[in-house]
Image: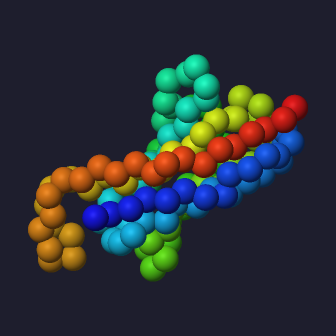
Amino acid sequence: QVQVVESGGGSVQAGGSLRLYCAVSGGVHCFDMSWYRQAPGNEREFVSTFRRSGTINYGDSVKGRFTISRDNAMNTLYLQMNSLKSEDSATYYCKANRPSGFCDDTWYSSLEVWGQGTLVTVSS
């Protein structure tokens, strides 16, 4: 059973920075890894993705301010958040998505796992 655990959230003033962490219980390189966020009363919003291929995408609202990265040896996904704004306040979720197929010569069925989230509060 694959587990995804986020950490690094907290309170920060506008203009500040935070780094979020997403620990995967195994084989992060076999997954497309993504960050989403959800503020109270809002729908869950795409933030960024780091695909197995190395392709990276960002949501329009965070481009130029957030940077996603991944450490395969540590099985960890990161989200460096700079120039934070009050509208960045939300619970941030990490998602691991693995389509069916081979990874490291082992065949896997498809799997999608979400973490429990980590809260980010930005005060203006």
Image spot of residue 109 (x, y percent): 14, 58
- Report the number of numbered marks: 0
The residue depicted at 34 percent of the width and 51 percent of the height is 113
Residue sitting nearer the eye, 96 or 6: 6
Among the 4 quarters of the image, the one containing residue 100: bottom left
Among the 4 quarters of the image, the one containing residue 119: top right
Is residue 52 something one can see in this rendering?
no
The residue depicted at 84 percent of the width and 35 percent of the height is 123
View extreme (bottom): residue = 73
Is residue 27 something one can see in this rendering?
yes
Among the 4 quarters of the image, the one containing residue 79: bottom right
With respect to residue 105, does 5 lie above or below?
above
The residue depicted at 50 percent of the width and 72 percent of the height is 71
Residue sitting nearer the eye, 37 or 50: 37
The residue depicted at 51 percent of the width and 31 percent of the height is 45
| Image position of 3 (left or right of 122) | left
| Image position of 95 (left or right of 16) | left
Image spot of residue 118 (x, y percent): 60, 49
| Image position of 69 (left or right of 24) | right
Query: Colour scheme in the image?
Result: rainbow
Q: Quadrant of the N terminus?
A: bottom left
Residue sitting nearer the eye, 53 or 10: 10
Image spot of residue 99 (x, y percent): 21, 53
Image spot of residue 111 (x, y percent): 24, 53
With respect to residue 29, does 80 lie above or below?
above
Q: Quadrant of the C terminus?
A: top right
